[in-house]
């Protein structure tokens, strides 16, 4: 079993991944500055796993903290979630995004190089694909210039890591291009806890269901899709967490830098999500149609064959599970981690 440094491990996807790592016998060190999370998520991860992890509160841009972590722990590999992720905010404060996401990632790989740790799994996004590509999106398709600064940081970091692995063959890097992570651990003890008004569909729906928001605004009903609303590939966060373990195993025995899509391969429209949520959970979701959101594409879903064939990964959960688990988490924790 390996010792893994998880940056951003207190966050939504990071906490679910820490739990799967502990459950499979790995040792975990988390570095998180708690800028968008609560340490309570890690308390619950440890309770669920009945095992402890090491938590360091700090920033990936702080090279002294990174050096100390690598000196005090024999780290085998790094899973790098830390970063800012709000698309709208990235248009307002681009420098914060360039600094946290791009400079932060450079700071991390520099520290890894100093420590001679060359295995890395990076949180990328389907947003790196050129918008002209037609779904299902596969990894051979061209990347493009993302419509927002957040997406731009993911593309730049992917390119930096690709160039790094070409220049120095000791590196072994997985770029995981997530589609739309939703859902929560079956226990309902850990889940997504966005600060302020949610940007993403699923937490908005669950906050309407729990009475924190009046109604869902559906951004556009005139897209060229099954019912006019936007189509996305929703992936259960536990399936996504497990993809990191599969990528880690793959990277422990390979070199170079390679991208994998992590999605189910199925697209669901906003109305399908809303209606299925209502059916599965027996709750009505008030909604209204409003105009399209700037930067949104009509349809995005994955071709996930490469991950299935090369990583030995496969999604286990469907949309109904995702919606039931999202609701269980929100119902048990109406105000998130509080
Ligand atoms: P999250 O905000 O819940 O988790 C990110 C964590 O990183 C938080 O705990 C935050 O406190 C921490 N962090 C931020 N900047 C940091 C810094 N400079 N130093 C140390 N810690 C820092 O987000 P998430 O949904 O779990 O996303 C994890 C990763 O996956 C991010 O890189 C995100 O961009 C990427 N991603 C997310 C989605 C999504 O829809 N959730 C989709 C594609 C990619
Ligand atoms: N939507 C609504 N109402 C809402 C929120 C979302 O109708 O209140 C719709 C969107 O228009 C879209 C779908 O629900 O059709 C999904 O929207 P999300 O915001 O949940 O997800 P996105 O596909 O827009 O976002 C994803 C990732 C981001 C990434 C972005 C790039 O979550 O990390 O793709 O476009 F940057």
Image (cartoon, rainbow, N blue to C red):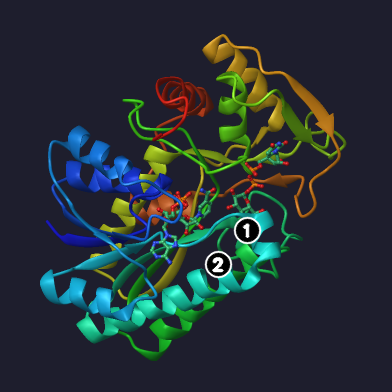
Question: Which residue is situated farthest in the front direction here?
Answer: 338
Compute the Cα span from label 1 to label 2.
8 Å
Name the image quarter holding the N terminus.
bottom left
| Residue found 15% across the figure and 60% down from its top | 2
| Residue found 37% across the figure and 70% down from its top | 60
In the rendered image, the vertical position of residue 4 relative to residue 278, given as above or below: below
Q: Which mark is residue 127?
A: 1
Does any atom of ligand 2 lie closer than 8 Å to the CB of label 1? yes
Does any atom of ligand 1 lie closer than 8 Å to the CB of label 2? yes
The reply to whether callout 1 and callout 2 are in contact (CB within 8 Å) is: yes
* Residue 279 image-quadrant placement: top right
Can I make out residue 313 in this image? no
Q: Position of residue 157 (x, y in %)?
A: 51, 74
Q: Position of residue 62 (x, y in %)?
A: 34, 76
Q: Which residue is mark 2?
A: 154
Can I make out residue 272 in this image? yes
In the rendered image, the vertical position of residue 167 relative to residue 81, given as above or below: below
| Residue found 18% across the figure and 41% down from its top | 23
């Amino acid at each position: 079993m390996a010792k893994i440094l998880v940056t951003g491990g207190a966050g939504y996807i990071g906490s679910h991944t820490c739990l799967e790592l502990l459950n499979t016998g790995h040792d975990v060190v988390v570095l998180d500055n708690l800028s968008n999370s609560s340490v309570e998520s890690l308390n619950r991860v440890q309770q669920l796993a009945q095992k402890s992890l090491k938590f360091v509160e700090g920033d990936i841009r702080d090279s002294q903290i990174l050096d100390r972590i690598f000196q005090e722990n024999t780290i085998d590999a790094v899973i790098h979630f830390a970063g800012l992720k709000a698309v709208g905010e990235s248009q307002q404060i681009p420098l914060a995004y360039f600094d946290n996401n791009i400079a932060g990632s450079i700071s991390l790989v520099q520290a890894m190089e100093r420590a001679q740790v060359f295995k890395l799994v990076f949180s990328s996004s389907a947003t790196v694909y050129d918008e002209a590509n037609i779904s299902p999106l596969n990894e051979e398709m061209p990347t493009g210039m993302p419509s927002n600064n957040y997406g731009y940081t993911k593309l730049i970091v992917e390119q930096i890591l690709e160039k790094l692995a070409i220049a120095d063959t000791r590196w072994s890097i997985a770029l995981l291009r997530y589609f739309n992570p939703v859902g929560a651990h079956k226990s309902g003890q850990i889940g997504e806890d966005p600060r302020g008004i949610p940007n993403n569909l699923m937490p908005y729906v669950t906050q309407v269901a729990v009475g924190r928001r009046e109604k869902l605004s559906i951004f556009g009903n005139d897209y060229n899709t099954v019912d006019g609303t936007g189509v996305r590939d929703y992936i259960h966060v536990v399936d996504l967490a497990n993809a990191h373990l599969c990528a880690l195993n793959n990277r422990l025995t390979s070199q170079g830098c390679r991208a994998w899509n992590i999605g189910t391969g199925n697209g669901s429209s906003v109305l399908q999500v809303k209606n299925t949520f209502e059916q599965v959970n027996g709750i009505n979701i008030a909604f209204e149609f409003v105009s399209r959101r700037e930067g949104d594409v009509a349809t995005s879903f994955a071709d996930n064959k490469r991950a299935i064939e090369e990583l030995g990964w496969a999604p286990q959960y469907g949309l109904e599970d995702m919606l039931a688990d999202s609701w269980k988490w929100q119902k048990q924790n109406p105000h998130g981690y509080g």
